[in-house]
Amino acid sequence: MLIRNAEVDGQIMDVRTNGKIITEIAPHLEGVADIDGKGGALLPGLHDHHIHLNATAAAMNSMRCGPPEVMTEDDLIKALDQPGEGFLRGVGYHHSVAGEINRDWLDANGPDRPVRIQHRSGRLWILNSRAMDELGIKEPKDGRLYDSDHIIRRSGFPDLTPLIKRLRSYGIVGVTEVTPSNGIAEFENYLEQAGDLNLSIMGKAELTGVSHPRRGHLKLHYHDHDLPALADLARVIGTAHDAGRAIAAHCVTRAELMMTLAAIEKAGPIDRDRIEHAAIADEAAIEWMQRLGVIVVTQPNFIAERRAAYLKDVPEADHPHLWRLKSFLGAGLPLAAGSDAPFGDPNPWAAMAAAVKRPKGFEAESITPEEALALYTKPAEDAGGEPRRVAVGEPADLILLDRGWDEARKDLGEVKMVSFTS
Ligand SMILES: [Zn+2]
């Protein structure tokens, strides 16, 4: 594969790969170009360091099936026209749309995949024949199941294909899956469905014994109202560390962060322990994190997405401590970023733009476009490592932008990918 006229570290270069790694970079390489980069920046593919794949896919695979979006039978047929594999889930159905629809109606008018539609009341699910097969049920014949969430829950994992396609359209080549409840079944499902997406899969203690390059951190998720005793938390962390597994702890509030840092200190930190979010961090917390050598994985998108709520709900004295970037980098904390989708927008370019141009009232923690990009180019397994580079011998997981870096850095939110397969 030969890419001609692409910008590498500020210079126009030709780049050759053997499909797996970059083999040559020079101002001119012999051979027929597979792609003309037209001066666009060539970068390492992006990594979302904090995402919940199944929940994001489930949300994407859910169709609104009632008012105000869907008003008529025709609207409903159009809404359901989503070919694909795996369950299609509809929500919010109301009989004003197309009457008391049933299995036969769905078989005749829906797509050729398992479909289940929830009535607005929440009590009724309407299934097509493929959905009933998938769930192993033959009754009721009309496919209208009342109060049967226990059966519906058997429907397994959502189809990740549309989500992965969307992530790839942003230039994402890898993700860290961080759902605390991930066990063996989830781990195997991600491996099976993710294709060549570079994964690191966090999860519960059940995964600690799994010896696999994609097995990630022990994910700890406690809330203010049910924080464990310090000694208990330290013991959980210590057990993971003894098995050579680093931990990643959800820390949104000050109390969660303080408790977690105390427990890590008690257990003794190991390389690659992570603090997820660190949404509120004052100078003392920064100093403590620095001392423990933990990696922080933040979400630059939230300050833009939730600004109004923060202004209303977070005391003004804490505004300087919210979703910090510049202070973390200034303190030398290893920092990376992820979307936290489905809770945040999975588009990393919108998040980078928000990191560079923070909303009014939160500008002090803005960082440069180069620093923002680097939050998404750390290695999959080491969010605190050096950003990956476009260089000979490096993996050919490249992305090509539709413009040079000087243009791109003016507004990262406008950047588009040029699609190609390296
Ligand atoms: Zn999360």
Image (cartoon, grey):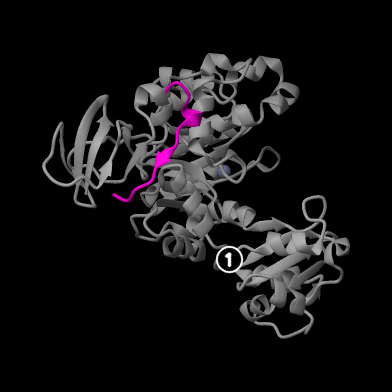
Q: Quadrant of ligand 1?
A: top right
Q: Residue at x 52, y 32 (%)?
A: 351
Q: Residue at x 46, y 19 (%)?
A: 367
Residue 102 in the image, given as x and y percentages of width and height: 79, 75
**Magenta-colored segment: predominant secondary structure:** loop
Please give left or right for residue 407 compared with residue 132 in the image. Answer: left
Q: Pinpoint residue 314: horizontal percent, then vertical percent.
A: 70, 23
Horizontally, residue 120 falls left or right of residue 107, namely right
The residue lying toward the viewer, choosing from 365 and 8, is: 8
SS of the residue under disc 1: loop
The magenta stretch spans residue 325: no
Vertical order, 210 against 261 (above or below): below
Residue at 31% over, 32% down: 386
Residue 298 seen from this side = no
Q: Amino acid at mark 1?
A: Pro
Question: Can residue 114 be spotted in the picture?
Answer: yes
* Residue at image location 56% in from the left, 19% down from the top: 282
Q: Position of residue 242 (x, y in %)?
A: 38, 49
Q: Position of residue 83 (x, y in %)?
A: 58, 65
Region of the chain picked out in magenta, as a range: 409-422
Considering depth in this image, is 186 or 142 the residue closer to the camera? Answer: 142
- 159 vs 284, nearest the viewer: 159
